[in-house]
Image (cartoon, rainbow, N blue to C red):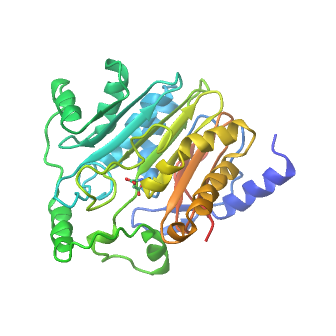
Amino acid sequence: MLDRRKFLKASALSASLLAIDKSGIAAVLPSTPLNSAAAKPIVISTWDFGIAANHDAWKVLSAGGRSLDAVEKGVQVPEADPKNQSVGYGGLPDRDGKVTLDACIMDDLGNCGSVAGLEHIVHPISVARMVMEKTPHVMLVGDGALQFALENGFKKTNLLTPESEKAWKEWLKTAKYEPVMNIENKLYDKAAPTKLPGNQYNHDTIGMLALDARGNLSGACTTSGMAFKLHGRVGDSPIIGAGLYVDNEVGGATSTGVGEEVIRNVGSFLVVELMRQGYAPEAACKEAVMRIIKKKPDIAKNIQVGFLALNKKGEYGAYAIQKGFSYAVCNAENQDLLIPGQSYY
Ligand code: ASP
C-alpha cells in the first residue's frame, strides 16, 4: 500500500515520465502511478540506452526467468551496439587507441564476477559471469581476462569502429587529458546536440538491476570507461561495491560517472547499506552523492556521478550530482519509461 507521501511522489514522478520514440524525440507518457511495491518483476538501468536494454531483460523476467539471466541479456544490447560509444563494441578507446572494457555482475546468492581492461571481446559481461561461475576468483584483468575469454570460446573481435577511431584521432590533435564528465548537462542545455566531438562523449556506463518473479535481485554493470583514459586505468564499473552491489536481503545499487569518486566512497555498497538502515532508494542514492560532494566539493561541482537503486520491494530511485542523469524502468505496466533522476545542482 502506498502512503500519502509516497503516492504524491509516485504521481509527481509519473507526471514527468518520458519515453523516447524511434526518432529519439522525448514524449510525455500518460500518468501512471509507479514505484509501487506490487510492481514486480522489474528491471531498471542507467541512461536512455537502458530502454532497449531493459526490453531484452524483460523478455527473461516476463517469462519467469532468473534476474541474473535478465541482467546479462539486457546489458548485452548496448555492449553489441556499435553506435553506443561508451559501452562494449564501438566504445571510445583509451589514449593509445585501445578499446578496453570493464564489467561486473552479481547474483542473488552473493556471487560475483568481474573483468577489467578486457580487449577484443564484445560481451565483457558474459566473461564476468563466467569468471563468477567457472573460477574460484572474482576478478580477472587485462591479458589474463582475454586469455580466459578465448579459452572459453569467446571470439576475438576488433572493437574499434571507424567512428570511434575518428573521434580518437580528432582527440589526438590536442591530446588534452581533461575528462569532461558532465556532458549530459550540455546535451540538455542544447536543443540539437547532434555534433558533439568524440571527446565529449566520454562516459556513460550501463548499470542494470533486476528483481525477478521469485523476488530475487541481480545486477550488471558494463562500460568502455572514460574515453581516452590512460592505458590500464580502471574505473568503478568492474569493482564490486563501487560500480555495483547487490544484497538479496536488501536491494541493489549501481553507478555511472567519474569512477574514481565512486571508488573512493565505495558508492554502491554504501547505497545498499543505507537502504538496509531504512533509507528509501532515492534517499540512499542522495546520501551517497552528498558524501562525494562533502568530501571533495571542488571536484564534485565539475563532474557527474549518478547512483541508481532498487530495493527488495521493487521500489527504485536515483540521484546524481548534476542534472541530466536519467534511467529507464521496465515492469509489467510500462516498458519504455525514461525517468529524469533527481540531482544536486
Ligand atoms: N563509471 C565509468 C568509469 O569511470 C564511466 C561512466 O559511467 O561514465 O569508467
Q: Quadrant of the C terminus?
A: bottom right
Residue 97 point in image, percent of width and height: 16, 58
Specify whether residue 131 is in view.
yes
Based on the displayed image, in which of its 4 quarters is residue 199 positioned? bottom left
In the displayed orientation, state which residue is furthest to the front: 295
Residue 258 point in image, percent of width and height: 44, 58
Question: Which residue sits at x=32%, y=19%?
Answer: 135
Based on the displayed image, in which of its 4 quarters is residue 59 positioned? top left
* Residue 27 sits above or below residue 253 on the image: below
Judge left or right: residue 298 versus residue 223: right
Residue 331 point in image, percent of width and height: 58, 42
* Residue 301 sits above or below residue 311 on the image: below
Judge left or right: residue 218 versus residue 237: right
Question: Which residue sits at x=57%, y=67%?
Answer: 297
* The one of 31 and 209 positioned closer to us in this rendering: 209
Q: Quadrant of the N terminus?
A: top right
Residue 234 point in image, percent of width and height: 33, 48
Specify whether residue 46 is in view.
no
Based on the displayed image, in which of its 4 quarters is residue 269 positioned? top right
* Residue 236 sits above or below residue 326 on the image: above
Q: Quadrant of ligand 1?
A: bottom left
* The one of 35 and 277 positioned closer to us in this rendering: 277
Judge left or right: residue 272 versus residue 170: right
